Structure formats: structure tokens, C-alpha cells
Image (tube, helix red, strand yellow):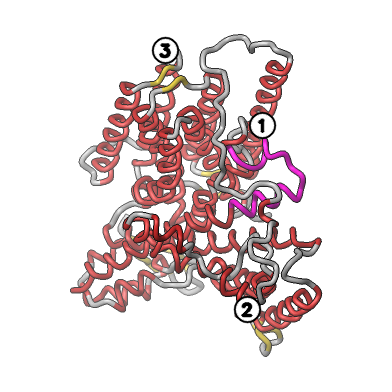
Amino acid sequence: PKAFSHDSPHCPVTTYWCWEVREHNSSEWCHFIRSNPDCHLDGGFLDYLDGVFCVFPPRLLPLAVTLYALWLLYLFIILGVTAEKFFCPNLSAISTNLKLSHNVAVFSLTSPLHGVTFLAFGNGAPDVFSAVVAFSDPRTAGLAIGAIFGAGVFVTTVVAGGIALVKPFTAASRPFLRDVIFYMVAVFLTFVVLYLGRIRLGEALGYLGLYVFYVLTVVLCTWIHRRHRRDGLAPPGLPGDTQESPPRSAPWPLAGEEYRPLLPSRESSLRILASALSPLDYRKWRRKPWYWRLFKAFKVPVELVLLLTDDLNWKRPLNCLHILTSPLLCILTLKSGTYGLYQIQGIFPVWALVTLVASALALIIFITTSNEEPPKYHCVFAFLGFLASAMWINAAATELVNILRTLGIIFQLSNTVLGLTLLAWGNSIGDTFSDLTMARQGYPRMAFSACFGGIIFNILVGVGLGCLLQMTSSQPLVKLEPDSPLVWVLAGALGLSLVFSLVTVPAQCFHLGQPYGICLIASYLLFLCVALLTEFRVIHFPTP
């Protein structure tokens, strides 16, 4: 439709869809954007639509798009660094303080449970936060669906196929069958929800309940397997069920490591603070190649800002600074600073009150502690760091969704195609490199299992939690109306890729090699061609 109407108290008002801005004369772009309610971006610190259509003159539109594309790439770096260096380690520290078994909570490479709880939450944080932000606005819900389905297709074809090409191996049969079946059920549920065009409270809770059931299934299967091994009984036999020995090192600090003082005990507080705020290891910098240094140079500003709000080790001056900066970060990023700028009785801003209280608390902690010995309540800083990291990821995800919607309006692309390409690729690139590296190091089975275990979390928690948070007591449902026939292409491609693996992997007795990898990657390229041809209306599909 070219326009839609909504009623005001006086007369019906006709409003045009925001993507129609490019169909007007360039001299009208700015007025169209500022006067059209559909062009209002909810949340975020920057108004990208106003910037590209009002701040930049029309002849500099290519420059604006280039700058937005570079900022988009940097947002992906922010999400990756925050999740890997801060969010995941804080989850590990919390699990240690809660005395949770690392088999369930910490790290997939040291556990046959493949990190189905805390690790999955850590690795899937960018995906889940992006989905929650996208579901918060019906206009961007297509981004969430496209990203969740698109990442599923990408990971189960390109990443899984790449692992088989890099290191042919024998897959663990039972975990593979379990994960594929659970994922197929999740995809089918999502297909039904999209067909109905809405998701109710019970269905959203059903997504989360299915993930809990999946976790319990993994725990039960692992317990049975270990009991058989302890009793000296070989589990009755499917091929490939023997476990792969994990790598010796883990990228997260494990139990106790996060509390180990890293600096000599007689360092002054000022020197400790200066050293703690340095994100560079100069000895490591000299040993690394130029491309690593270049990428590190892009990450250093992000890591420096993050260090101001989060660090697991006990460094008294920095931890006291976190008492001030972390609460300020939370209130200034929540709802894009709306709560932080609110004035109590119209006089005293909330951020000033938080600053006063946090400064007093930080001063008390500084006076009552020492540089050499962490206090007994040091574990509280892990919870504070977790909250700060979550707020950083949420803020970056909000900007990411807004800039993708802006690019969609500029190029007149549907949210679904942006989700299945840019958002899915950006959120999956870290997992792709880590899984392929794991396979090269001799652990292809673990990498292959991670392909399926991680995306189960993303689809069940991403859709379930994302929709649940948007429901209210007066409206316990969320409308999910596909904005493009591409959604059905996505759902079909994901279903076909899963059926293909479910049939061919057992047919090969779970021995996966280069032919399997080539078929998966070729199928993704075919899907991408069909998706783009559908988006540009070269191919027409009947919609339900």
C-alpha cells in the first residue's frame, strides 16, 4: 500500500510509509522525514534518518551511506568485544559464586553439555538483545525474524559445511540427532506463529519452556552417558558417541582466576589505576602481525570505555570507580537516557542523585579496603559488571537496529532481507571464526555441535523473550506480520537444510567430509540467490 490512514479526534489523517521518501523530490526529503510518524525511530541516541536526509545534502547521500556502513561495522565490533571480553567472563564469575557446576554453566569446550545455559547466553547475547530490540517495534520485527532465520541458515550450512571441509570427522550421533530434532521443532513453531500473524502469552512461554526442556534433556543424556562410562559399560552403539577431549585452555577465566590479584602488592593506587585502564599488552603487541595490530587498534577505544565500567580482577581504585560509572551507565543507556535525565520534582536530575550516592559508596569502599586483598563482597562486582555489560550490548543493539532500518529505507529494502544478510552475518561472524579455528585445532566435533546448540538458544530465547517483554496485561499478544514473502523463503530454506542434514548425516554413518561440506555451502549460495531475486521481485511466491 502507498499510504495508510489513522483517525484523529477531528479528521482522518493519511500517513505515508517512510520508505516512500526516495520517491519524492530530494528537496522534500527532510520535510517528509520530520513530518511523517512512520519515520520516527524509537530509542537510540542518534536520529539516523534525520541525519541522512536533513543534515547531509542530497548530493552527499553516498558519503552518508558510507559513513553509516562504517559505523555499522564498528557496532558489530562493539557487540563482539563486549560479549567476549566482559559479558561472558562475568557470567563465569557469577556461576562460580552461585556454586553452579561448570559442566552446566561455564564453557562448552570443557563440558559435554556444550554450554547450554550460561555459555549459550554469553555467545548469543548480541543475537538475543538485537531480537529483543527489534521486536519492541512492529516496524522492525522483520529484522528479528530475518536475523534469527538467516543466522540459522548461515550457521547450519556455511559454518557446518566449512567445518567438514577444514577437518573431515565423525559426528557425535546422539547429540547431533537431539539438537537437529529440537531445532526443527523450534523452526516449525516459528513458522506456525508467522502463519497466524501473532504470538500469544502461552506461545511465548512455550518457547522458553521448550528451551528449559532442551537443557534438561542435555543434562539427562550427559548424566546417563557418564554413568555408563563410570560403570565400564559402553553405551549401546551409534557411531561417533565417544567424547572428544577438550582443549586445555579456555578464553574465559574459570573458577577462582577472576579474583587473583594481577599486580604486585606494593603498587600505588594511581599506578594500579593507570595500568588497569590500559587495554594493550605491549609484549603481545610486538609479537603480532600487522593485521592483528590494525584490528586491535579499532578495538582499543571500545575496550578502554568498557574497562571504565567493568573488570573482574580486584584493582581497588578501578573497582571503586566502577561503583560510580556502572550505575551511571545503566540509567543513561536505559531508554536512551530518558530515566537518567528525568528531574525529581522538576529540579534535581536522577543522574546527579545516582552520582552522589555512588560517590559516597565508592569512597567508603576505598577507605575500608586495601590494594593487596579483595574484600569478601568482591563477588558483587561480577553482578555489577554483568549488568553494565548487558546495558552496553543493549545500547549497541538499539543503534544497530535503527541504522539497519535507515539503510532499508534508503535502499527501499525489506527488514527481512537486511536481517538475513547484514544482521545475521554480523552476529554470526564471531562464531564462524571460533568454530573453524576449533576445527583446525583438532576439535571438529565440538565445533559442529556448537553450530546447532547455539542457534537453538537464539531462536527459542530470542523469539520467546523478545515477544514476552513486549506484552502487557491489556494486550497479551504481539503481532508478527511478515513484511515480505521472503520470510517464507527463509523458513523453507532453513527447514530444507535441517532435513538435508537429518537424512544425509546418518546415511553417511555420521562420517562427514568434503562432499557434505560442498553441498551445504552450495545450498546456501542457492538460497541467497533465490532470496535476493525474491526481494527484488524477479521471483514471485504466493503468500499464505
Q: Amino acid at mark 1?
A: Phe
Residue contact between numbered discs 2 and 1, judged by CB atoms under 8 Å: no
> Which quadrant: the C terminus?
top left
**Image location of residue 462, percent across then percent down:** 54, 46
Q: Residue at x 47, y 54 (%)?
A: 80
Tell me the residue that label 2 is attached to: 270
Q: Secondary structure at mark 3?
A: helix
Q: Residue at x 58, y 73 (%)?
A: 332
Q: Callout 2: few (<14), some (14-19), or many (20+) C-alpha neighbours within 10 Å?
A: few
Identify the magenta region. 88-108
- Say the numbered circle drawn on residue 213: 1
**Residue 456: within the magenta?**
no
Judge whether 391 appears above or below 489 on screen. below
Give the spatial CA distance, label 2 vs label 1.
50 Å
Residue reaching furthest to the bottom: 347
Q: Amino acid at mark 3?
A: Ala
Give the spatial CA distance, label 3 vs label 2.
64 Å
User: Main SS type for the magenta part?
Assistant: helix
Q: Secondary structure at mark 2?
A: helix
Give the spatial CA distance, label 3 vs label 1.
28 Å
Is residue 502 visible in this depiction of the protein? yes
Q: Amino acid at mark 2?
A: Leu
Tell me the residue that label 3 is attached to: 507
Q: Select label 2 or label 1 by which is in front.
A: 2
